[in-house]
Image (spheres, rainbow, N blue to C red):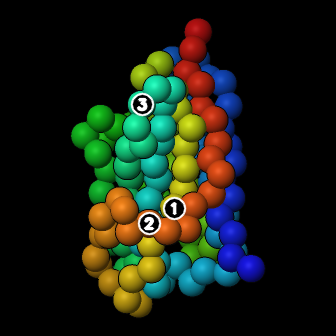
Amino acid sequence: QSQVVESGGGLVQPGGSLRLSCKTSGFNLDSYAVGWFRQAPGKGREGVSYISADGGVPYTVDSVRGRFTLSRDTVKNMVYLQMNNLKPEDTAVYYCALARTSPLSSYLPTDDEYSDWGRGTQVTVSS
């Protein structure tokens, strides 16, 4: 059975760091793009960072670029989001999601193509 499970969230002070983990089971990451998304209270879901199936340079949105880094380990079937210099506006539930692509494709799917989602992990940035 395929599963996507996020972990690593928590409460952190502004300027602090967290590393989110996404454990995938039943997926061959060489055939899936992976994205990290977030949803803040009262706001819509937004994509944060993405990596294509070929493991190319991740794409990260402007609001977190330079602070957040996505990486993956295809042997462990894990995807990570290192978050540094966290700000209160980063407070949200963070989700990991997968989208099926051709093997080793460099294609980055649109957000609505991500079909396998975890349940999320809460990140709260507050003093």
Q: Residue at x 38, y 44 (%)?
A: 46
Q: Label 3 amino acid?
A: Lys
Decide: marks 3, 1 in contact (CB < 8 A)? no
Crowd around label 1: few <14 · some 14–19 · many ≥20 (10 Å): many
Q: Residue at x 39, y 82 (%)?
A: 101
State the CA–CA distance, disc 3 to disc 1. Answer: 19 Å
Rendered position, 44 above or below 1:
above
Disc 3 secondary structure class? loop
Name the disc covering residue 27, or none: none
State the CA–CA distance, disc 1 to disc 2. Answer: 6 Å
Left or right: 82 as drawn, with respect to 120? left
Left or right: 84 as drawn, with respect to 79? left
Ranked by sequence position, the earlier of labels 3 and 1 is 3
Residue behind mark 2:
114
Q: Is residue 69 visible?
A: no
Rendered position, 29 above or below 15:
below
Residue behind mark 3:
43
Give x and y (percent) for residue 95.
55, 50
Decide: marks 1, 2 in contact (CB < 8 A)? yes
Q: Quadrant of the C terminus?
A: top right
Q: Residue at x 74, y 79 (%)?
A: 1
Q: Is residue 122 visible?
A: yes
Give x and y (percent) for residue 33.
42, 72
